């Protein structure tokens, strides 16, 4: 029943870990060949792998876990998927219905525990409605603002048989989020766009979630109007990094030109982003003189943090299509004079060259490592995942993304340990592509058990570890905020990563010399199998530019010289 | 998900009525939430309020359409206009929530609450309690030689006022249902 429902939903891969309460489903999996099961080494890994699979394909990712500890281990992944709006379905086993509530072995109130960290969840109490529930689960996961769902299936419900319900027979009418935007508001936005002297597009993960067509429409609109565009961490790749209107990422560690453009613009068009606190900085001083438009499929995102003038509830793809239609019908007008001045101003900001760094001496700068990784891999069919921390921000700054669905990172929840299992999910979906996880050594250790998975399933994922023997971002904040008292932010007793790789039966590469870096990266790319690349980098490098907590966009820190007293007492309490 | 089909400026089903600016004034709003009567739906609604730090002043819930498996949750909540708009939009996101109505802004509504009050005493106080109950149109639903249980229906303010009057007369226990509310008129 469960396997049939998954097949009918187009599932070809399931990431999971067996246990007592899911044995009947595993028995079904054993007796078929349509769905591939990937045995992870920890349930958190299963959920992140499903996320990586979902983000890189646009399909719904699936994870299968057992009751009790299996389900509680899935909670971090579910929360991660909720905050980044990733469509996944997690099936969890549960003790039989007649034992629920008796504190049975491996019993947990899974539906209760996961209620706030799923878009929706179900306890499937009846085999007769199980197939329908699974189909509803997929519908809810992928419709509207996507998100994680969990279906908890007691063991007796798995054993019992009932008549199967096909997906076509399911009534989904009670959950149908609005796709088309209000045409009056769209016209209002086009009018504003025609007149604006200093417009900017601020795009987010919603463009990626809406599908490749939305990215295509965005590109067409940006090229046709000549309006500069910046993106959140989640939205990278929707507009190509090589595009002439590209400003780079914005936000706390965003580019100088992107944040200055956000601060000084007179029209801000938010496309599928949510004014996250990493983006806005000090809310009272956020882009003070601009008219703001916000396109979002989730009405609760609108006016949650920043009050906007033109709210448009709808799917990004549908709304962009209508914007283009209306704009063309009205004669393709833009404020050419204003835009020319605006671009001149932006070019002046670009001259600040906020990402410049000096690679000197015999120690590898992390920025240099990523610059070389970019140069040597950008022509490959490449997918990048990351862990969380300084390396993640540097990857977002120094790697260029030309297409959507190529960049998988934990944005909202900031989950250390996300990147490695995610890279496994991505590689499963794209067997012949180059999949690289840009990692820090501390994050990577959080889910390193998945080396077993990578080796077992011959997944040639490349673990590119920028090893500074520190929790780099924590160290940076302690330097700026806590009087350089580096409380517990160094990585003591690190393993020898090369030997670790070999212990798992994989390849390990060590590099600590900038002169050897290119050869070492090429060796990693050319090796047909999983690789742990231990890249020893400068230990005290800080990640800049940076908008300190409690500051507006136009008060960025650009480098070491400007950090004295940068964060005041009020900003210190912020995260 | 009717709550999602909203348009800027539309009044009746709007999940967010835009206002000229966000004021800091705390407003009390009565929300009617129509939900599928399925396990856990009340926990979802309450979890939303506790998880996001919103206030619940009163909450009632009961099945209103047995055939269609629909329940109606009436919530009285307090917050700034911005918070109230967020609450409505967040409620609208919950999958089994069908409609969210803000009875406070959608035009006139009737709000009623039922209270049961136990008053003990003898002599003049007992007579006075009975006299006041008559003024408030409260019914006596239980009586002993030393006590009454009054049943009173009305707005929350009326029940507050009645309870305040009963306190010096020997009020020992109060049970209240919370507010149930409906919009006035044919619709």
Image: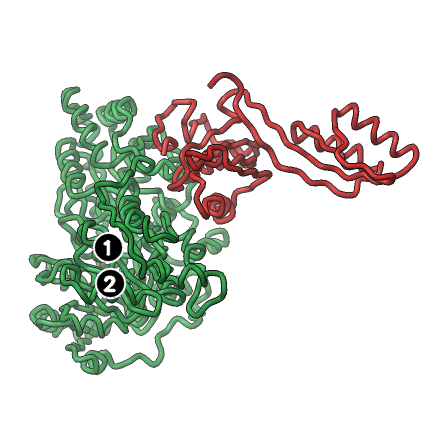
**Colour assignment, chain B:** red
Q: Nearer the viewer, residue A239 or B153?
A: B153
Q: Residue at coordinates 51% horizontally, 32% vertically from top-left?
A: B31
Q: Residue at coordinates 29% horizontally, 68% vertically from top-left?
A: A18
Where's residue A172, x and y in %? 29, 38
Left or right, A347 with reference to B123: left
Asked which quadrant contains residue A97, the reply is: bottom left
Q: Which chain is green?
A: A
Q: Residue furthest top?
A: B186
Where's residue B116, x and y in %? 71, 37
Chosen colour scheme: by chain
Q: Nearer the viewer, residue B176 or A497?
A: B176
Asked which quadrant contains residue A566, the reply is: bottom left
**Same subunit under labels 2 and 1?**
yes
Host chain of mark 1: A
Residue under pointer 2: A15
Q: Secondary structure at mark 2?
A: strand
Host chain of mark 2: A
Where's residue A375, x and y in %? 11, 60
**Residue at mark 2 to residue at mark 1: CA–CA distance:** 9 Å
Q: Does the CB distance between marks 2 and 1 fall below 8 Å?
A: yes
Tell me which numbered mark, 2 or 1, is placed earlier along the sequence. 2
Q: Nearer the viewer, residue A569 or A172?
A: A172
Left or right, B159 with reference to A370: right
The vertical placement of B11 against A22, above or below, is above
Q: Which mark is residue A61?
A: 1
Q: In the picture, which quadrant includes the C terminus of chain A? A: bottom left
């Amino acid at each position: 029943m469960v396997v049939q429902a998954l097949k009918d939903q187009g599932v070809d891969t399931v990431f999971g870990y067996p246990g007592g309460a899911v044995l009947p489903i595993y028995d079904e999996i054993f007796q078929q060949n349509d769905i591939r099961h990937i045995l992870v080494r920890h349930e958190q890994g299963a959920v992140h792998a499903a996320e990586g699979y979902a983000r890189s394909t646009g399909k719904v990712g699936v994870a299968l876990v057992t009751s009790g500890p299996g389900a509680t281990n899935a909670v971090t992944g579910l929360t991660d998927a909720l905050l980044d709006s990733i469509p996944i379905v997690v099936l969890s086993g549960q003790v039989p219905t007649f034992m629920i509530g008796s504190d049975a072995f491996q019993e947990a109130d899974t539906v209760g525990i996961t209620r706030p960290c799923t878009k929706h969840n179900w306890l499937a109490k009846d085999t007769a409605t199980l197939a329908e529930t699974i189909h509803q689960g997929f519908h809810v996961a992928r419709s509207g603002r996507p998100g994680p769902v969990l279906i908890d299936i007691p063991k007796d419900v798995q054993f019992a048989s009932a008549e199967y319900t096909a997906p076509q027979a399911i009534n989904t009418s009670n959950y149908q989020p609005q796709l088309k935007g209000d045409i009056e508001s769209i016209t209002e936005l086009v009018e504003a766009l025609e007149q604006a002297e200093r417009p900017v597009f601020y795009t987010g993960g919603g463009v990626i979630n809406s599908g490749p067509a939305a990215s295509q429409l965005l590109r067409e609109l940006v090229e046709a109007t000549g309006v500069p565009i910046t993106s959140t961490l989640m939205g990278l790749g929707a507009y190509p990094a090589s595009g002439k209107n590209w400003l780079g990422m914005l936000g706390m560690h965003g580019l100088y030109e992107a944040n200055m453009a956000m601060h000084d613009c007179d029209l801000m068009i938010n496309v599928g982003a949510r004014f996250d606190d990493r983006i806005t900085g000090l809310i009272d001083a956020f882009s003070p003189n601009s008219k703001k438009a916000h396109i979002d499929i989730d009405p609760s995102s609108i006016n949650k943090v920043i009050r906007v003038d033109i709210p448009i509830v709808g799917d990004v793809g549908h709304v962009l299509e209508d914007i283009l239609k209306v704009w063309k019908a009205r004669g393709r007008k833009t404020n050419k004079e204003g835009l020319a001045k605006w671009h001149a101003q932006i070019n002046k900001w670009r001259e600040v060259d906020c990402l410049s760094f000096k690679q000197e001496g015999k120690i590898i700068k992390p920025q240099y490592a990523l610059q070389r990784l970019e140069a040597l891999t950008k022509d490959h069919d490449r997918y990048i995942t990351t862990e969380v921390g300084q390396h993640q921000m540097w990857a977002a700054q120094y790697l260029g993304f030309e297409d959507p669905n190529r960049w998988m990172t934990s944005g909202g929840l900031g989950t250390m340990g996300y990147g490695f299992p995610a890279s496994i999910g991505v590689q499963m979906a794209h067997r012949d592509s180059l999949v690289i996880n840009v990692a820090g050594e501390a994050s990577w250790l959080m889910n390193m058990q998945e080396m077993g998975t990578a080796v077992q399933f011959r997944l040639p994922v490349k673990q590119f570890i920028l090893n500074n023997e520190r929790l780099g971002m924590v160290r940076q904040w302690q330097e700026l905020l806590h009087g350089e008292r580096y409380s517990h932010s160094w990585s003591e007793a690190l393993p020898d990563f090369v030997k670790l790789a070999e212990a798992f039966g994989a390849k390990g590469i060590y590099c600590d010399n900038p002169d050897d870096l290119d050869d070492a990266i090429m060796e990693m790319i050319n090796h047909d199998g999983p690789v742990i690349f231990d890249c020893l980098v400068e230990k005290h490098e800080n990640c800049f530019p940076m908008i300190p907590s409690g500051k507006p966009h136009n008060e960025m820190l650009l480098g070491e010289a400007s950090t004295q007293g940068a964060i005041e007492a009020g900003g210190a309490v912020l995260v | 998900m009717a709550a999602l089909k909203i348009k800027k400026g539309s009044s009746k089903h709007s999940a967010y009525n835009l206002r000229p600016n966000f004021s800091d004034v705390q407003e009390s709003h009565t929300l009617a939430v129509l939900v599928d009567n399925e396990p856990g739906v009340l926990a979802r609604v309450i979890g939303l309020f506790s998880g996001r730090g919103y206030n619940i002043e009163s909450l009632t819930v009961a099945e209103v359409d047995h055939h269609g498996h629909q329940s109606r949750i009436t919530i009285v909540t307090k917050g700034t206009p911005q918070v109230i708009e967020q609450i409505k939009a967040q409620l609208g996101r919950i999958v089994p929530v069908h409609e969210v109505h803000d009875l406070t802004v959608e035009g006139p509504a009737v709000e009623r609450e039922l209270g049961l009050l136990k008053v003990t005493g003898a002599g003049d106080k007992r007579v006075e309690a009975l006299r006041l109950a008559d003024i408030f149109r409260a019914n006596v639903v239980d009586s002993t030689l030393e006590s009454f249980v009054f049943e009173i229906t009305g707005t929350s303010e009326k029940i507050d006022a009645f309870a305040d009057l009963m306190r010096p007369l020997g009020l020992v226990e109060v049970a209240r249902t919370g507010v149930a509310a409906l919009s006035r008129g044919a619709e």
